Image (cartoon, rainbow, N blue to C red):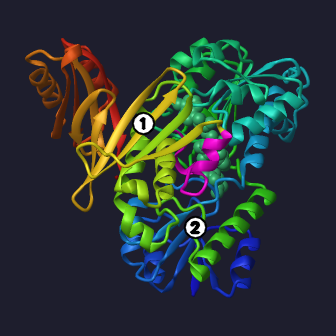
């Protein structure tokens, strides 16, 4: 079997693959058409962020069985197209956390002591001792946005520097944050109290442009901002204005909305109070050895023994189990994603009830798929079918499974209650026919909906005219409704309407829907990929 390494990979990874008996070609920097010409002869492909694994490339990859990303980010892989072609996509989310946290701390110290600016000044033949007055970090407050793997390591390093640590992470239970000595606060409070702010969240619908003009206006005038997570979490135009007009003291970015970035497309690079690195967060020999070793082992295990680790697009189950519960695995993942999107506050407990014939089947892959679906909206590529239960445990989430012979009107049901710090929700799903997942209950509302693609969830009063107003508002915005289901609760005179739309609902459109008469609440849902 042959493996192509098409991006820079530590030799440690190549050695693992070769020692396992695989033939390895290292061929980096190929143009897309060059790669397309040769990909047909490979069983495995190892990449980092440069190679684009598109549907077009996968079409030409007749023998390809696995794509392995040495690192976390899979923005450059069309996972849906890979699934359709039966290609397993794996990553190595754990290997570079320490290194990236250290990079964020390095950025904070570089900003505090003007190290990049002073270096440039000396290299220009100057000795500007007065100009580069710095400040200590001891006793200052570090605000951390996202207290997962990297955020919590950054917190421990900052505590070692005698800093106070506070964090904003609405999905993290308070007790977990307290365990690592971090106080959880709201985003505005974090902006107001921090002397330094560092970002460690993935880019999601919720986190895109989370750091905005309003956020900067709440920061202290001498506070400094650092982002070593993902481009686009911070609005770069807003950051430019905040730095130029001295709304904040300084900023350091390792990641950009457009990468590679240049002075032509990024005016930030002209500013003296701005420090940057070209996405070097994971670039240490230790981290690169780690991720290369991990991905090398995973790929050889898969190609030679068929065992799947850290796969983002296939649960590791035997074909027998897959044939029996496969559609429920998809349903479980859909319900997980929906639960996270409608939950408020940190999730504390998950109760999964398997009813009907399901009660006698091997349901553990469904539970795993549910947990993967649950974490995907907030963790993106960092969660997979292997680590999802570990993430639940690490976050102190109790996962309780139960079984019942009775499935009411259906042959089988999957009923899942999620308890979060600000309330609980119940979703019940079933599979119609051989493979048609359906949501049949949302809290007290009975309905029949396909939980897939972009959706709009509306809570309204059960009075005439609401559906018409909704249709007109979406129609005026050019949004097509492909499916609609209404759930009714007569006792409370309340309805829910669940619409499938051809595109995601924008913030502006959502605000218009929320302002309609007799609508109590509305939210967009993103169930793409199912
Ligand atoms: N610069 C680099 O080279 C580099 C290297 C590694 C990782 N990263 C990036 O760093 C980021 C964090 O990685 P990680 O391993 O710590 O991930 P993680 O999944 O362990 O943690 C992410 C945290 O973000 C939180 N979160 C999600 N949505 C949030 C929101 N709206 N507001 C606040 N918090 C939210 C989650 O609850 C979670 O605790 C990822 O985007 C990753 O791709 C960058
Ligand atoms: O340098 C890299 O490979 C990217 C590192 C990081 O962003 C990741 O996604 O793991």
Q: Which residue is mark 1?
A: 339
Q: Is residue 167 left or right of residue 36?
A: right
Direction from residue 15 to residue 363 in the image, left or right = left
Q: For the view shown, which residue lies furthest in the front direction?
A: 405
Location of residue 83 in the rendering, given as x and y in whole percent from the top left corner:
40, 65
- Above or below for 63 versus 354: below
Quick one: quadrant of the N terminus? bottom right
Residue 207 image offset from top left, x and y in percent: 51, 33
331 relative to 243 in the view: left or right: left
* Left or right of 313 on screen, residue 499: left
Q: Nearer the viewer, residue 293 or 389?
A: 389
390 part of magenta stretch: yes
Report the span colored magenta. Answer: 377-394
Indicate the quadrant where residue 303 lies: bottom right
256 vs 366, nearest the viewer = 366
* 530 part of magenta stretch: no
**Quadrant of the rendered image containing residue 497:** top left
């Amino acid at each position: 079997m042959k493996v192509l390494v098409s991006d820079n990979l530590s030799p440690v990874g190549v050695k693992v693959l070769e020692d396992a008996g695989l033939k390895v070609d290292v061929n980096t920097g190929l143009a897309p058409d060059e790669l397309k010409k040769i990909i047909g002869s490979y069983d495995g492909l190892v990449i980092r962020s440069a190679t684009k694994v598109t549907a077009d490339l996968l079409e030409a990859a007749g023998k390809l069985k696995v794509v392995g990303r040495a690192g976390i980010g899979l923005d450059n892989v069309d996972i849906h197209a890979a699934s359709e072609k039966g290609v397993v996509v794996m990553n190595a989310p754990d290997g570079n956390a320490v290194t990236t946290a250290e990079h964020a701390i390095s950025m904070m110290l570089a900003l505090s002591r003007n190290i990049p600016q002073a270096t440039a000044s000396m290299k220009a033949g100057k000795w500007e001792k007065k100009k580069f007055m710095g400040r200590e970090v001891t006793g200052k407050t570090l605000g951390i946005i996202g207290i997962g793997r990297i955020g919590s390591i950054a917190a421990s390093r900052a505590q070692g520097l005698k800093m106070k640590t506070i964090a904003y992470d609405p999905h993290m239970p308070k007790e977990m944050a307290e365990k690592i000595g971090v106080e959880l606060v709201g985003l505005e409070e974090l902006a107001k109290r921090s002397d330094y702010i560092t970002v460690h969240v993935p880019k999601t619908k919720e986190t895109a442009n989370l750091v905005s003009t309003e956020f900067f206006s709440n920061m202290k005038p001498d506070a400094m901002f650092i982002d070593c997570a993902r481009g686009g979490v911070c609005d770069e135009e807003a950051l430019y204005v905040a730095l130029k007009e001295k709304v904040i003291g300084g900023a350091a970015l390792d990641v950009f909305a457009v990468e590679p970035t240049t002075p032509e497309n990024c005016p930030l690079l002209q500013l003296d109070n701005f420090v940057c690195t070209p996405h070097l967060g994971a670039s240490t020999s230790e981290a690169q050895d780690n991720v290369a070793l991990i991905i090398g082992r995973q790929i050889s295990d898969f190609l030679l023994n068929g065992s799947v680790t850290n796969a983002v697009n296939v649960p590791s189950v035997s074909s027998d189990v897959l044939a029996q519960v496969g559609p429920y695995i998809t349903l479980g993942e859909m319900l997980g994603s929906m639960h996270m999107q409608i939950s408020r506050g940190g999730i504390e407990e998950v109760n999964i009830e398997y009813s009907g014939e399901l009660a006698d089947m091997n349901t553990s892959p469904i539970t795993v798929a549910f947990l993967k679906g649950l974490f995907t909206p907030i963790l993106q590529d960092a969660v997979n079918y292997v680590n999802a239960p570990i993430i639940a445990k690490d976050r102190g989430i109790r996962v309780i499974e139960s079984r019942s012979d009775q499935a009411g009107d259906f042959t089988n049901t999957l009923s899942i209650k999620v308890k979060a710090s600000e309330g609980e929700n119940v979703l019940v799903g079933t599979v119609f026919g051989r493979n048609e997942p359906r949501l049949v209950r949302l809290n007290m509302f009975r309905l029949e909906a396909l939980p897939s693609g972009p959706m709009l969830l509306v809570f309204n009063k059960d009075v005439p005219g609401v559906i018409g107003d909704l249709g007109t508002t979406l129609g005026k915005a050019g949004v097509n409704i492909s499916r609609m289901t209404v759930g009714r609760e007569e006792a409370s005179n309340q309805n829910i309407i669940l619409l499938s739309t051809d595109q995601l609902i924008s913030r502006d459109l959502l605000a218009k829907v929320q302002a309609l008469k007799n609508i109590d609440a509305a939210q967009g849902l993103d169930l793409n990929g199912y």
